[in-house]
Amino acid sequence: MKRPRLATLTVHGLEPKQDPLTRALVQPIYQSAVFGFKDADQGAAIFAGKEHGYFYTRLGNPTHTALEERMAVLEGGESAVAFASGMAAIATVTLSLCRSGDRIVSSYPIYGGTHQLFKELLPRLGIEVIYVDATVFPEEAKRVINKRTRMVYLESPANPTLTMVDITRARRVARLFAAKVVVDSTFATPYHQCPLEMGADIVVHSGTKYLGGHGDTVAGVAVGPKKFCEEMKSVILRDLGGIISPLNAWLLLRGIKTLAVRMARHSENALRVAQFLEAHPKVRRVYYPGLPSHPQFDLAQKQMRNGFSGMVAFEVKGGREGGRRLLNHVNLCTLAVSLGSVDTLIEHPASMTHSTCTSKELREFGISESLVRLSVGLEDPDDLIDDLQTAFKKV
């Protein structure tokens, strides 16, 4: 049988599997902290790495394994590791690659939590982070990448301005000094983009968002080479302990089964809403990769497939006060951070998700005081447009 297409992979993986004990179609939740050994010899062999087996959930759990196998298949990677959150995934990948004295070259803008990690924690560990504008990343990165660079970190599409990075060209720059390319592909998911196919070494996701899809779980995933994932799990993750719970792993597996149909609808709805916003007289600018007006529309068409995901950002006329009035008068859209849920969520990045950025950093990242971020859900798009239209009357 030839390799199944992505929608089939989200449901079955490479082939349909049933629980070997009961033939249950749904992966069981192994809600156990500890697993017993059949005898002392087996226990010693497992601890010595001579035999595979589960013995303590911080170091492995069958539900974790099922999730990791599915994500590796979806991203086209050799292996995967699941984490307690997206930030746990990013931090663990970073600490697995970098040591004191190393340099990270990162595109900007990026998620506020990642920026805080790069700005506050990593310098304490002697790890330097240099930022480069995503729109000119491959060219400008050449000026700052050097022999101390261990990681090139990209977020594409970026949070919150939907800026794109040319992953293939960025990989060529990283190869100049054998740096690893890590891509946060949370906004795109494997349905819209597979960074490993474009030369990235590792891809990370906040599974809390589109992968879970229902706003009921917090999780993270990293996909990459088998050796790297095994070392990351057996050293950094083992010691820091940022593991996902079996229940959250199971919720993520459940969410992934509907990923393809959800992302198709998210993308359709977002395009409709973006087109409405672009034509609205009280909107100064719309950021959406699926609009021809997006400055990187051609790159988005090359790197993304099946549409352009469900994230839209836009600048409201009237500055911060205009955005505040809009947020205070939506009804169907929920004023909340996070994204990727079936519900439409709306927020103000400068005062919420990116509030830890200084005014200078916000300007450099292209995040204006009037910028509003919209995670378009699965409601009827006409109802979402009606809700925004009513709220705009108060702006």
Image (spheres, grey):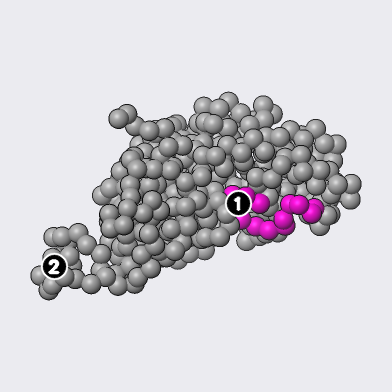
Closer-to-camera residue (144/373):
373
* Labels 1 & 2 near each other (Cβ < 8 A): no
* Chief secondary structure of the magenta portion: loop
Tally of numbered tags = 2
The mark that comes first in sequence, 1 or 2, is 2
| Label 2: element kind | helix
The answer to whether one can see residue 346 in this image is yes
Give the vertical position of 116 relative to 393 (above or below).
below
Question: How crowded is the residue under tag 1: few (<14 C-alpha within 10 Å), some, or many (20+)?
Answer: many
Q: Which quadrant holds residue 42?
A: bottom left
Q: Amino acid at mark 2?
A: Gln
Place of residue 274 in the rendered image (x, y in percent of width and height, measured from the top left): 71, 36
Q: Quadrant of residue 108?
A: top right
Relative to 38, residue 391 above or below: above
Given residues 181 and 246, the one toward you in this image is 246
Rendering coords of residue 296 (x, y %)? 60, 30
Res 134 quadrant in image: top right
Say which amino acid is labelled 1: Ser
Q: Percent from the top left, x then y, of residue 2?
A: 32, 29
Identify the residue shown where x is 19% and y is 71%: 37
Q: Which residue is mark 2?
A: 42
Mark sitting on residue 341: 1
Q: Which residue range is magenta in the image?
A: 330-343
Work out whether residue 101 or residue 373 is closer to the camera in this orientation and state it. 373
The residue at 44%/49% (across/down) is 204
Question: Would you place residue 382 above or below residue 349 in this image?
Answer: above
Does residue 143 appear left or right of residue 178 in this picture? Answer: right
Is residue 150 found inside the magenta-colored segment of the image? no
Horizontally, residue 58 falls left or right of residue 105, namely: left
**Who's the residue at 36% across and 38% down the image?**
76
